[in-house]
Amino acid sequence: MAKSERAKALEAKQKAEARAEKERKRNSTNPADWGRWRQMVETYKITAKDDKHLVWMTVAGLVVPIIAFIILGFVLNSPLIWGMLGVSVGALVAMLLFAWRARRAVYTRYEGKAGSAEVALQMLPKGWISTPVITATRQLDAVHRTLGQGGLILIGEGDPGRLKQLLASEKKKHEQVAYGVSVTTIQMGKGSGQVPLDQLAKHIKKLPKQLTPAKINEVNQRLRALDAMRPKAPIPKGPINMKGARSAMRGR
């Protein structure tokens, strides 16, 4: 009997904890606690503020393939099968259009703002470890870092003249702790030899693969030790809270 009472008490406790956790996630502002549907809704809210054509483009991406496949189905005397295929293709096209418009709107909104490179770093796939604003100047020149299969990358944003010296200094520090891992420097911007914000993530993903997951973890531990010795950067880490939009904007 006592055992049964303990079991009931444990069950009640587990149910209470489950309800509390569900309520916490419902009220959470942390994207990690959100489901896919809420992420999509939040992404729409962010994007719709800057992209007035988002709804029509997404609807067109859904409807046009459906109509085209239904017409093809009647021509081939199989409208139902082709119509169902059209729904699948239309949903895929709509999702791709939505992701593309979302990325475009975010890049447009934060182009030229201090710390905007963090937007592009958040678009990198899993496996990349990004640290925004590892160092910065009072003139708002900043260096960001990301580590992944493509190596150790330092991204500078700000005045090109000042960045050259700042990136060179950071590259030397990182080479001292990276132990043989090549350090690549990138200047973000629209000038000659620079990489624009909306092309930064794509540029980084195209770099040749040179590090294994084990090596990435090893180097990351050394970088954390380097960061622990740094003074805090004089500007905030990044311009935004992406509110769960990352997975949708990556097209996933």
Image: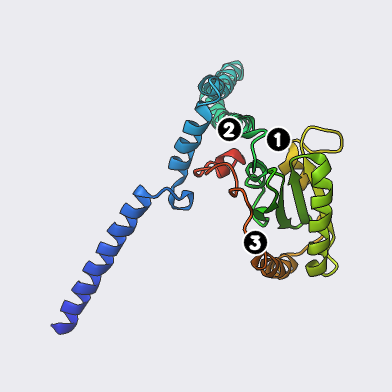
**Residue occupying image coordinates x 58% and y 32%:** 102
Tell which of 108 and 37 is nearer to you: 108
On residue 52, the disc is: none
> What is the residue that sits farthest to the bottom in this orientation?
2
Query: Foreground mark, 2 or 1?
Result: 1
Tell which of 161 and 10 is nearer to you: 161
Q: Position of residue 99 (x, y in %)?
A: 59, 34
Q: Is residue 21 left or right of residue 93?
A: left
Note whether residue 207 is visible. no
Label 1 Cα crowd, 10 Å radius (few <14 / some 14-19 / many 20+): some
As measured in the structure, the alpha-carbon distance from the residue carrying label 2 to the one carrying label 1 is: 12 Å
Q: Position of residue 83 (x, y in %)?
A: 53, 25
Counting residues from the start of the chain, the first of labels 3 and 2 encountered is: 2
Residue matched to label 2: 102
Label 2 sits on what residue type?
A: Ala
Q: Position of residue 174 (x, y in %)?
A: 78, 63
In the displayed structure, would residue 40 be above or below residue 220?
above
**Residue occupying image coordinates x 56% and y 33%:** 95
**Residue occupying image coordinates x 58% and y 16%:** 71
| Image quarter of the N terminus | bottom left
Counting residues from the start of the chain, the first of labels 2 and 1 encountered is: 2
Label 3 sits on what residue type?
A: Pro
On residue 198, the disc is: 1
Residue matched to label 3: 231
Label 1 sits on what residue type?
A: Asp
In the displayed structure, would residue 59 be above or below residue 31?
above
> What is the residue that sits farthest to the front in this orientation?
138
